[in-house]
Image (tube, rainbow, N blue to C red):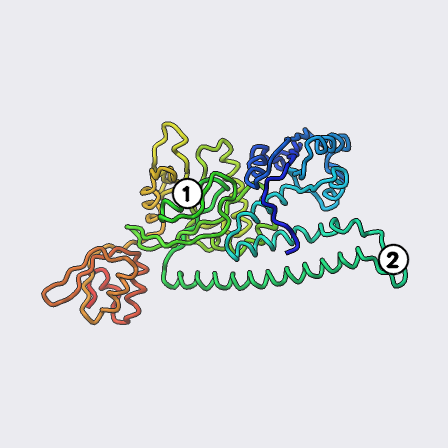
């Protein structure tokens, strides 16, 4: 790799900009939480009120001088801007401050680098970081820019810079090739689940909304969950058997955030495709968050970017344990379909309502009844058991299996059609002759 993954602990000054455009303005509290998630030791929070962006420093020269004095006084190692900086602005500010400078995108990339655990996750983070660094390589060789020149004296700075750029391009191609293989494997797995008619349900939502805690409590898993931004980076899939539906695959995915860098959306496309190819999205919302409507809006923007905005969505209002007077419940639309579920993933209240709502939305035309299977249908009987669709089994005096089953009718049709001997009308009689 061409970059270091900083483990945090650096003395950091945070620079927050109050822009005139409310759409471009960032949340200062969220900015502080991002820095904390990266492990930064914040020594100062510098607020720049209503500024006019400048091409050289982004902020005015007077504020730059104030910041320079603050950096030297606090002996800061790093200055982080809660805004997007151009490569030239980063270089100019570093010359003045005599320390490293990164922007909001760079900060999120640092957090992602710390959180990645799987091989795929590390590749995706490296792709995003290298892509981000490709326009910033020159700052590492500014001390060589004026050396060399003339016939036979090619500048060493130029040579090293071109070498790094060439190596970076090679590495980018390698990573993209590996991620393409991962994408193909994921697509193959999705096709396998589709052939087996096992629906996929994906958890999406703003970062730190409680997706991983909900995932763990529903699936009895031990995915890493913490009260910090981007605690989950690598996607996790688990099989879950619902009483009124049968098996589903539940996917826990990376959280979204306001102004999620486009480079990250591109790098994590193969991961996010797990959401865009789902049968149902569970949009987990922090019910105790004052700005939850803005967070909902940001999640929908990212879903639109990955082509998942038109998928069926069940809103899950989490963290009821932080609210007073609100009970777990299912809220329905005018047609009686579940629209949102209120629950607490931490204490488990309302989880059964969530499973009920998922089963209702995915069940469609649910078949519930008893099937009579003669012995020649032993293979079919085994498939019903494999799907977890059998609730009870008995045998009559002729040795015929009487299976009490519950499963989607489409799944039943698919299974029996393989035998090629069962007319559709027999399904209504609950008997396979």
Give the secondary structure at mark 1: helix
Give the secondary structure at mark 2: loop
* Quadrant placement of the C terminus: bottom left
Identify the residue shown where x is 45% and y is 37%: 286
Pointer 2 local density, CA inside 10 Å: few below 14, some 14–19, many at least 20: few
Sequence order check: which comes first, mark 2 or mark 1? 2
Residue 283 seen anywhere in this rendered image of the structure: no
* Residue bearing the label numbered 1: 213
Q: CA distance from mark 2 to mark 1?
A: 60 Å
Which of these two is toward me, 37 or 206? 37
On the rendered structure, is 408 left or right of 287? left
Residue lying farthest right? 151
* Residue bearing the label numbered 2: 149
On the rendered structure, is 55 left or right of 272? right
**Residue 211, horizontal then vertical, whole percent:** 44, 44
On the rendered structure, is 176 left or right of 161? left
**Residue 39, horizontal then vertical, whole percent:** 57, 40
Residue 159 seen anywhere in this rendered image of the structure: yes
Identify the residue shown where x is 55% and y is 53%: 268
Q: Are marks 2 and 1 in contact (CB under 8 Å)?
A: no
* Quarter-of-image position of residue 402: bottom left
Considering only vertical position in the picture, is 44 above or below 381? Answer: above
Considering only vertical position in the picture, is 285 above or below 381? Answer: above
Identify the residue shown where x is 40% and y is 61%: 193
* Quarter-of-image position of residue 14: top right
Which of these two is toward me, 415 or 113? 113
**Residue 175, horizontal then vertical, whole percent:** 59, 60
Which of these two is toward me, 68 or 184? 68
**Residue 312, horizontal then vertical, whole percent:** 43, 49
Considering only vertical position in the picture, is 39 above or below 126? Answer: above
* Quadrant placement of the N terminus: bottom right
């Amino acid at each position: 790799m061409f970059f270091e993954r900083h483990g945090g602990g650096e003395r950091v000054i945070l620079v927050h900009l109050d822009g005139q455009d409310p759409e471009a303005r960032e949340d200062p509290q969220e900015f502080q939480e991002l820095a904390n998630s990266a492990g930064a030791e914040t020594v100062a929070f510098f607020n720049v009120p209503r500024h006019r962006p400048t091409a050289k420093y982004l902020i005015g020269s007077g504020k730059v001088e104030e910041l320079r004095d603050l950096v030297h006084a606090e002996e800061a190692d790093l200055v982080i801007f809660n805004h997007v900086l151009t490569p030239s602005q980063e270089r100019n500010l570093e010359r003045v401050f005599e320390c490293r400078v990164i922007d909001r995108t760079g900060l999120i990339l640092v957090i992602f680098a710390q959180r990645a655990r799987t091989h795929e996750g590390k590749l995706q983070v490296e792709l995003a970081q290298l892509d981000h660094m490709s326009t910033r390589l020159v700052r590492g060789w500014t001390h060589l820019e004026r050396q060399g020149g003339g016939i036979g004296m090619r500048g060493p700075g130029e040579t090293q810079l071109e070498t790094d750029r060439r190596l970076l391009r090679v590495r980018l191609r390698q990573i993209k090739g590996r991620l393409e293989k991962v994408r193909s494997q994921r697509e193959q797995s999705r096709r396998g689940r589709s052939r087996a008619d096992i629906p996929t349900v994906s958890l999406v939502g703003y970062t730190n909304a409680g997706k991983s805690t909900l995932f763990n409590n529903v699936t009895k898993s031990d995915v890493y969950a913490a009260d910090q931004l981007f605690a989950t980076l690598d996607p996790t899939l688990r099989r879950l058997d619902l009483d009124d539906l049968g098996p589903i695959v539940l996917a826990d995915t990376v959280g979204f955030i306001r102004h999620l860098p486009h480079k990250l959306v591109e790098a994590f496309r193969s991961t996010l495709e797990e959401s865009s190819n789902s049968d149902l999205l569970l949009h987990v919302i922090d019910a105790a968050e004052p700005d939850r409507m803005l967070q909902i809006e940001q999640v929908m923007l990212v879903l639109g970017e990955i082509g998942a905005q038109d998928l069926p969505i069940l809103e899950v209002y989490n963290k009821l344990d932080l609210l007073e007077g609100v009970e777990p419940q299912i809220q329905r639309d005018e047609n009686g379909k579940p629209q949102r579920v209120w629950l607490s993933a931490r204490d488990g209240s309302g989880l059964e309502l969530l499973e009920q709502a998922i089963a209702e939305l995915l069940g469609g035309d649910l078949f519930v009844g008893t099937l009579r299977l003669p012995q020649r249908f032993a293979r079919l009987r085994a498939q019903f058991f494999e799907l977890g669709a059998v609730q009870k089994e008995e045998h009559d005096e002729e040795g015929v299996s009487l299976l009490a089953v519950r499963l989607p009718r489409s799944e039943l049709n698919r299974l029996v059609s393989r035998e090629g001997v069962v007319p559709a009308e027999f399904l209504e009689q609950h008997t396979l002759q």
